[in-house]
Image: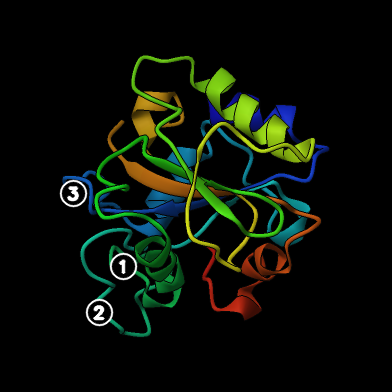
Amino acid sequence: MLTRLQKKYADKSVRFLLFPCNQFAQQEPGTNAEIKKFAEQYVDLAKSGRDSNVIMFAKSNLNGVACTYSGEDACTPGSKECCAQNDAVYKYLLANTPPGTISWNFDKIVTDVSGKPYSGEVIMHGGDVDAAVSSAVDSLLEGKTPNLVALPDTAFAAGWMHSWQWPALVASGLLASAGIYASRSKGQAVDAAADDSSGYIQIA
């Protein structure tokens, strides 16, 4: 799925930020480097920062508790630990989604270019995932409101928040990941998130 979406939106103001997570039944136990190597079978991660529309970040938490280990090695390619510097994603999810919204793979949030979030299970197991994602993203790119439930305002970013299991979606099975699909040209928070200086740690 993500392979096709990466190509489809290559020249659009859309960015896919991938945050691996081991909180979904501990299905992402590998190191950051192992996770990236696996993902590279399905998506192009050769570029980094603002030059890419798909970016892989160091492992973070999405549910339950923030990262508890804060050692300097937590965010390195060889680490299997949760990267505390990426906890902003966890905090954003808790602050802007109803309890239980991110309960398992395939729950999502979509936000417009002003940072207004929406929620809806528009991508489900067995459904037409590409069509569901494309419909909502295309609506946002056209300045339209997606057919989703509005959540409290946030200044975080613009795009899709989506958690999935890496080998079930062709770019997904043994692993569980989460991503933010975001505006590349209109959201300063998104552009900042693509830079190491923002505090988010990309996998080298």
Earlier in the chain: of badge 2 and badge 1, it is 2
Mark 2 and 1 residues: CB-CB less than 8 Å, in contact? yes
95 left or right of 116 in image:
left
Amino acid on which the number 3 mark rests in the picture: Gln
Amino acid on which the number 2 mark rests in the picture: Tyr
Mark 3 and 1 residues: CB-CB less than 8 Å, in contact? no
What residue is at 32 percent from the left and 62 percent from the top?
61
Q: Is residue 144 above or below residue 178?
A: above
x then y, percent, for residue 184: 75, 54
Residue under circle 1?
Answer: 82
Secondary structure under tag 3 reads loop
Residue under circle 3?
Answer: 26
Secondary structure under tag 1 reads loop
x then y, percent, for residue 71: 31, 84
What residue is at 73 percent from the left and 62 percent from the top?
187
- Mark 3 residue crowding within 10 angstroms, few (<14) / some (14–19) / many (20+): few
Earlier in the chain: of badge 3 and badge 1, it is 3
x then y, percent, for residue 139: 70, 32
What residue is at 45 percent from the left and 28 percent from the top?
122
Q: Is residue 127 above or below residue 161?
A: above
* Mark-to-mark CA distance, 3 and 2: 16 Å
Mark 3 and 2 residues: CB-CB less than 8 Å, in contact? no
Image quadrant where residue 65 sits: bottom left
90 left or right of 136 in image:
left
